[in-house]
Image (cartoon, rainbow, N blue to C red):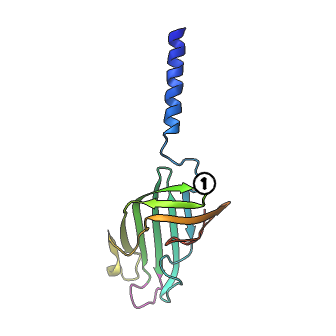
C-alpha cells in the first residue's frame, strides 16, 4: 500500500511540476491569428496597390510571426497584378495581461516573395529581406472579444480573429 501511495504522489508531483513549468500559451487570450486589411508599414494604401492584408500570429509555443500581402493593380507600371508576401518570423513573445503589454524578444528573419503577376517574369521566389521586421520590445494592447487593438509600436492597429 505504501508503495502504491508513494508512486501515486510521485506521479501527481511530476504532473504538477510539469504544469507549473509549462512554457506554452495554450489558454492565453492573445494566442491565435489576428488580421486586418491595412498596408503594414505605411500610413495609407499606396496608389498602385489594390488591397492589403496583415496577419499577426501568436503561437501556443510563444512564437510570433507577421505576414503581409500587398496586391498591386493589374494595370500598374511596376509589377502589375502581383501579390507581394512578406513574412517576419523567428521571435518569441510574452505578455503581462495586467499591464496590457506584450513583449517581443529576439532577432527574427524575414522573406519577401512576389507571385501571381500579370507577367510571370515579374514573379520572384521567397528571398531574405529587411523590408519587414517585428521590433523587439514592449507593445501596449487592449483585448475585447475577437478584437485586438495594439496601441503602441510598429504593430499598432486593430486586428480581428
Q: Which residue lies furthest to the top in this view?
A: 1
Q: Main secondary structure of the magenta part?
A: loop
Residue 15 percent coordinates (x, y): 51, 30
**Which stretch is magenta?**
72-80
Residue 22 percent coordinates (x, y): 49, 41
Q: Which of 38 and 2 is in front in this view?
A: 2
Q: Which residue is drawn at 51% across and 78% down?
A: 39
Q: Which of 19 and 123 is in front in this view?
A: 19
User: Does 56 sit left or right of 100 as displayed?
Assistant: left
Q: Relative to 123, does residue 100 appear above or below in the rendering? A: above
Residue 14 percent coordinates (x, y): 49, 28
Residue 87 percent coordinates (x, y): 41, 67
User: Does 67 sit left or right of 109 as displayed?
Assistant: right
Q: Nearer the viewer, residue 22 or 84?
A: 22
The answer to whether residue 31 shows anywhere in this view is no
Secondary structure of the residue carrying numbered label 1: loop
Quadrant of residue 99 in the image? bottom right
Q: Residue at x 55, y 8 (%)?
A: 1
Reading the image, the residue beneath label 1 is: 29
Tell how many labels: 1
Q: Relative to 47, does residue 155 appear above or below in the rendering? A: above
The quarter in which the C terminus is drawn is bottom right
Q: Nearer the viewer, residue 38 or 76?
A: 38
User: Does 130 sit left or right of 68 as displayed?
Assistant: left
Amino acid at each position: 500500500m505504501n508503495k502504491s501511495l508513494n508512486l501515486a504522489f510521485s506521479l501527481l508531483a511530476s504532473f504538477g511540476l510539469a504544469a507549473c513549468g509549462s512554457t506554452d500559451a495554450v489558454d492565453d487570450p492573445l494566442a491565435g491569428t489576428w488580421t486586418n486589411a491595412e498596408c503594414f508599414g505605411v500610413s495609407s494604401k499606396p496608389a498602385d496597390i489594390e488591397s492589403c492584408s496583415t496577419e499577426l500570429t501568436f503561437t501556443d509555443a510563444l512564437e510570433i510571426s507577421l505576414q503581409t500581402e500587398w496586391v498591386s493593380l493589374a494595370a500598374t507600371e511596376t509589377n502589375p497584378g502581383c501579390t507581394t508576401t512578406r513574412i517576419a518570423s523567428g521571435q518569441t513573445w510574452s505578455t503581462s495581461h495586467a499591464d496590457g503589454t506584450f513583449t517581443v524578444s529576439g532577432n527574427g528573419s524575414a522573406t519577401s516573395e512576389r507571385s501571381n503577376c500579370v507577367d510571370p517574369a515579374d514573379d520572384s521566389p521567397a528571398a531574405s529581406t529587411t523590408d519587414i521586421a517585428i521590433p523587439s520590445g514592449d507593445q501596449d494592447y487592449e483585448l475585447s472579444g475577437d478584437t485586438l487593438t495594439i496601441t503602441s509600436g510598429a504593430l499598432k492597429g486593430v486586428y480581428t480573429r
